[in-house]
Image (tube, rainbow, N blue to C red):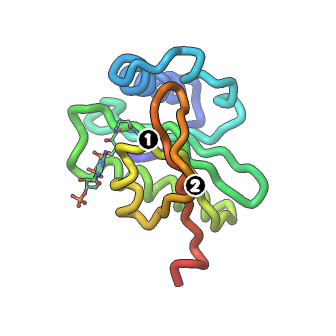
Amino acid sequence: MFKCVRTMDDLLQVLMIRAIVFMEEQGISQADEMDGHDLAAVHVLGVMDKEPVACGRIRYQGDRAFLQRLAVRRAWRGRGVGSELLHFMLEECRKSGFRRFELHSQTRATGFYRGHGFMPCGEEFMEAGIPHVNMRLEDDKQE
Ligand SMILES: CC(C)(COP(=O)(O)OP(=O)(O)OC[C@H]1O[C@@H](n2cnc3c(N)ncnc32)[C@H](O)[C@@H]1OP(=O)(O)O)[C@@H](O)C(=O)NCCC(=O)NCCS
């Protein structure tokens, strides 16, 4: 159900999900959503019954993998799709040798990431007009 994007068609489906969830549902501007990093990122797409339902973006910086733009279309939420997406993204990072993961969680979504071992660090800050918290997960620290 999840795959790393390798075609323009898949990338367009990712951008459609982001337009629906972040721009339409959450009111984030096009300029904030399309931040210029998409062409150099790894994108993940989740498809169910031929519908694009979930997506996420990975950017590698130094020894850290940054997980960004995780989204599940509203009608598919609350049934484990987001968790499967996060697992897939983490495994993809691990396959590339990364063991340190970082993300900016919308403050209202920290419970979701906490449930997967991420811990908040630092003060709340605003990003794209929405309160966020920096969260980290390190494989070594879980052992
Ligand atoms: C956050 C998001 C990706 C979660 O996807 P989902 O498919 O609903 O998540 P799941 O069904 O896998 O939920 C897994 C667990 O996290 C919890 N959870 C989900 N969203 C949550 C939230 N916003 N806050 C707290 N807990 C949350 C669920 O209750 C569930 O807990 P359980 O296992 O004890 O039942 C989805 O709500 C979404 O796309 N939101 C809009 C976009 C967004 O805000 N993305 C995050 C940007 S940082």
State the residue at coordinates (58%, 24%).
8
Residue closest to the far bottom: 143
Residue 39 versus residue 30 in the image, above or below: below
Residue 77 has which mark? none
Q: Residue furthest front?
A: 123
Nearest to N terminus: mark 1 or mark 2: 1
Residue 52, horizontal then vertical, whole percent = 36, 31
User: Label 1 to label 2, Cα distance in Å?
Assistant: 14 Å
* Residue kind at label 1, given as amino acid type: Gln
Percent from the top left, x then y, of residue 4? 54, 44
Res 11 → quadrant: top right
Amino acid on which the number 2 mark rests in the picture:
Gly
Q: In the structure shown, which secondary structural element does the residue marked by tag 2 occupy?
A: loop
Name the mark on residue 122: 2
Q: In this rendering, would 139 be left or right of 64?
A: left
Secondary structure under the numbered disc 1 in the rendered image: strand
Q: List x then y, in percent, for residue 98.
A: 67, 63
Q: Is residue 78 visible?
A: yes
Q: Is residue 106 left or right of residue 122?
A: left
* Towards the viewer: 46 or 22: 22
Residue at point 57% right, 73% down? Answer: 139
Residue denoted by label 1: 106
Q: Residue at x 42, y 25 (%)?
A: 22
Whether residue 18 is situated above or below residue 142 in the rendered picture: above
Residue pictured at 35% horizontal, 43% vertical: 108
Q: Is mark 1 within 8 Å of ligand 1?
A: yes
